[in-house]
Structure formats: C-alpha cells, structure tokens
Amino acid sequence: MTSHKTLKSWTMINSRLPLTSVVLAALVAGCASSGVRNPSGVPVTEMRADERGFVAGTGIESQDIVRVTDKMAREILSIPQIANAQGTPRIVLDPIKNDTRFPINKDIFLTRIRAQLNSKAQGKVLFLARDRMGTLEREQQLKRSGQVTSSSDPNVVEFRGADFFLTGTLQGLPTRTGAGISDYVLYTFQLIDARTSDIIWEGFDEIKKQGLEDAAYR
Amino acid sequence: MLAGCATVDRKPAVPLTGDIMIDGPNAIENGPERDRVLWQYRTAAAAMRRGEFELAKRYLDDALLTLGGIYGPNESARKARSLFRPESTKTFVGEPYERAMAYFYRGILYWMDGEPDNARACFRSALFEDAGTEEERYAADYALFEYLEGLTSVKLGEDGSDAFERAVKASRLSQLPPYDPKANVLFLIEFGIGPTKYATGQYGEQLRFRENPSAPRTAAVTVGDQKLTAGACDDLYFQATTRGGRVMDHVLGNKAVFKSTTSTLGDVGIISGAVLAGHRGRNSAADEVGVGLLAAGLISKLFSSATTPAADTRTWDNLARYLTFAFLSLPPGEHAVTVEFMDAGGRLIPSLTKNITVNVPVGRDKIVFVSDRSTTPQTL
C-alpha cells in the first residue's frame, strides 16, 4: 500500500509537471522571443537617394530632396523664357529660406537643381559662380598685376551679370496630437527676372508625413 | 535565468571620473547604446559652457538624429513596455523638456553660425516637443522659444508679431520687451539647477521630478556703462511638471498591478499549498492539491519578482533651471562684458560672475551663450 500510495503521489505530481513545464517553457520562450533584433547590427546598405530607407522620420529626407529638385529642374527647362531664349540665360542662385521646423542644409536644394540643369540642359542655361567671387577676384588681381599669365585683357571686366535669380522657400505646418505627429512641408521655387523683378516661373511640391512614436516615448 | 533575460544592452556602464568632458566622450564611445543620447546631451551642455561649440554641435546633431527617428516600431521601446524589462531599457531621448532643450541649444549654435532660419527651425522644434500636453494651456508654452522664433523672423526680414504675441501670452515670469531690430548682440543666459527625476510608488513605477534649490534668480549683463538685468523667462521645473501623465505611466501602472497581483497570488498559493500538504496524509487529494498550489504559488512569485515596473529616472542632470536673454546694440569690435547672477533677494552671488570678451562682427549679429556654470574668463 505504501509503495502504491507513493506511486500514486508521484503519478499526480508527474501529471502536474507538464503544466509546470509548459508555464516555465512559456516564460523562457517569452524571454527568448524578445531577444535583440539584429544583435550584430545591420551591414552598411547602399541605397538610392530617392528611396525611403529603414531609418526615417517626419523631417526632410533625401528622397524628398530628389523628388522636389527633379521636378523643379524639369519645369525650369520647359518654361518659354529658357526653352526659347535667344542666347544663353545666366542664372544666379539666391539662398532659399527655411521656414519649417527642421534645421537643414538648405543649399542642397539649389545645388541639386543646378547640377541637374548643368548635366541635362545641354547648355540651355548657365549658372554664375557668385559663391566663388572671392577666388575669382583674387585671380583677376593676379592677372592684372602680371603675377600670372592672362589669355585676355585682365583689365576688362568679364564677370557676367545675372539674367535670372533662382530661389525658393520651404514652409512647414506641424501638428501633434495623441494620435501622432504630422509634418506638412511646402516647397516653392521661383525664377526671378533680374532686370524687372518679375517672377517668371514658380514651381512647388508638397509632402506630408505622419508618424507615431512608441508608447514608451509618449 | 530571469535576471539574465532582463539584460538587454550587453555593454556595461563605463566607470565615471566625475569630469563630464572625460566621462561623456567615454560613455558615448564605449557605454551602453541606450544611454548614448543622454551622454551626448550632457556633454554638449558642458561643452557649450566651455565655449567648445563645435563639440557641442557634433553631439547635439547626432542626438537629434536619434530623437527625430523614434517613430514607428522600436525594439528597445517595445522591450521597455514588456513586463520583464525596466523602462530604462529603451533608448534614452529624454522627457519633452529635455528634448526641447536639445533643440534650444542647437538653435543657439545655428544662430552663432549666422543661420537664423535654422535657429528658428530649432526653436520651433523645441516648442513642438512641448506640444500635446494633457492640459492645453501648458502646451508649447516656453516664452523664450516663442520670443526667439519671432526675433529670428524679424532678423530675416519677416514678421515676428504672431510669435511675439504668443511669447507674451506664455510668459509667466517676466515681461518681454518688444523686438529691437537694431540690437546686434544677443545674450542667451541660463542659471540654476534643472529638475531631476526620481521614482515613487510601491515599485518605483511613478516618475516624479525633484525641484532642486537654485540660488541665482536673475542675471545682469554689463558692457561699459550699459547694464541690463534679466529675470527668468522660463523655468524648466515648471515645464517638466506641467505636462500631465505619460502613456508610459499607464504601462508602468499595469506592470505594477501585475507584479502586486502575482506576488499576492504567489503568497496565497504557497501558504495554502503548504497548509494543505502539511495537515493531511500523504495519500490524500488535499495533499496533491497542496503540492499543486505550492508550485503555482512559486511560479507566480517568480513572475512577480521578474516584473520590473520601475520608471526610467535617467536625467539630463546638468541642465539649468531658468532661461533668459538680454540684447543690446554694440559697435563691431572687442567688448569686455561682465555677467553677474543675483539671488532671490537681489544680492550678488560673486562666485558665479563671468568675464567675457565678446568680438562683435561687422554686418552680422553676435549670439553669446552664458551659463552660471560657464568657465570664466572666455573670449567669444
């Protein structure tokens, strides 16, 4: 009887063991499943500038810059004052205004538009290197003083004046509620006639992004 | 086993020397990834006070990149919400007042570099971090950030009147002067000791902010025969404590309830199981039930002890408490400036006095950052 009782007790305990094991296993499995994702990091991934990467916020990102500047460059080439111009119009870049909540290197927009036009416009427009005037003037002085050679008369001013100014403005409208945050950015660019101050072209693009941070950050 | 599960970041905390300019870079480079932004904030603030603005820029830029990318699924944040990981598992980006200050400092640095539009963007983002409070009247209510948003607009040749009106409305501590477009030297001044965090509640699940005693209450800027006194525009302790509850507080509250309940159930199971198993014969059903209850009680206690509802008390602990400004017109060239701090009774605190040589450039505004913890003398 004693051995039978003992056996029965063990049987009962053993019958509970699976339950206990399941609970423990669930606990262990729970810990294991919440293991570190990408524990070894993510290898450097080369991405196209116009694609949304796995690191993203609601701010101004490379894909936005590519999209906006591609659109502006295309539009500039199609306006009559450029497409049908007699002679080659000269353009000077005037820094754009950042009126958003995102600090950015704003020159990047005009730099990319200029590069797009220079590489694809086949000489329909030319940009003047006003941001290099200091260097250019020093070189001119060296030529005038005879310290370096000159292929033309260094006393004749050949720096060209602008026909147009290309500039723009970035404006933003942020919203934050319990449902998340939203950032709308309006990108506008203008080509301004340097002689008359007419805005001969204005192009725009707009991008709205929304996101919600993890509850741990709310 | 459970303790092992709770360990997420394998990098140990770095040993500290007490010198932020050694500890900060060391922790950023070698410390746990989750604390990286915390140390970047701290080191940037210390660098600002030493006039090492390039270093401050580098750390703030990296920290703000992390801050700007917290949207969507986040592994460390998910773990911080789980029952068995503490909140401090998550990558630190700070509470809204800390995030706002990171943008504020970066805005000062942009303005110093002659980029008022990017400075304005930072002041706007600083305000944006304070939006979404439980009570609408406390949302985005930093008087100084609003004021500076308007002032940068004026400096850009735009209209700053809306921002000025909002600043006046938000201003609780001092009367704001109208913009003076001719003023070319702006002093941005901070003083006092910012709030620190602590946890309260049965399991430390409730985040609270401690008000630290701050002797200086006003600052005075003296240049030649010009003397300007500036009272505080904003109080970071006020900002930290007027946001209302966090969503994470509910998560931690639930964790605490789970911990408490499983602990109680464990106690009941263990005691009941022991009583049943001990008072009856070994062959009885009660004995078997008792053993089962004992096992269940132990497991419940295990769950309870593994549950970590503690609030994250990591703090940007070298922040100032009060923020203010003073602006004046000075001709280009070198100027000897004295910045003094006074206590609540208007008495000078001589140990905090700063002597600064300010070089005012031609055709550009000069932005001068001064803290009661700045090194002195400085040439800016």
Image: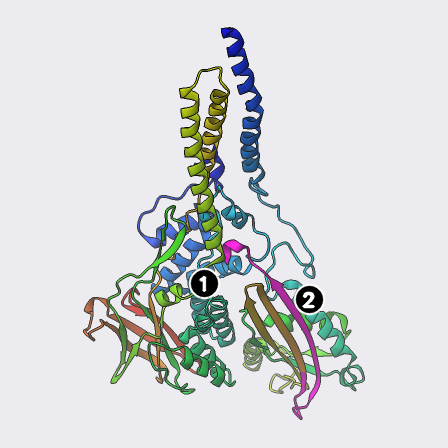
- How many numbered circles does the render carry? 2
Tell me if residue A212 is in the magenta stretch: yes
Q: Please give the label number shown on residue B96.
A: 1
Dividing the picture into quarters, in which one does residue B208 lie? bottom left
- Output the chain of dot 2: A
Q: Position of residue B89 (x, y in %)?
A: 47, 47
Q: Residue at x 45, y 27 (%)?
A: B294
Quadrant (top left, top right, bottom left, bottom right) of the C terminus of chain B: bottom left
- Please tell me which residue lies in front, B259 or A83: B259
Image: B374 above or below B296 = below
Q: Nearer the viewer, mark 2 or mark 1?
A: 1
- Output the chain of dot 1: B
Amino acid type of the residue that numbered disc 1 sits on in the rendered structure:
Pro
Q: Give the CA separation, mark 2 to mark 1.
A: 32 Å
Magenta span: A191-218
Any part of residue B195 in sight: yes
Helix, strand or loop at label 2? It is helix
Within-10-Å neighbours for mark 2: few <14, some 14–19, many 20+: some
Query: Please, which residue is most extreme toward the right here?
Result: A84
Image: B55 above or below A76 = above
Q: Judge from the rendering whether residue A146 lies leftward or rightward of residue B168; answer left or right.
A: right
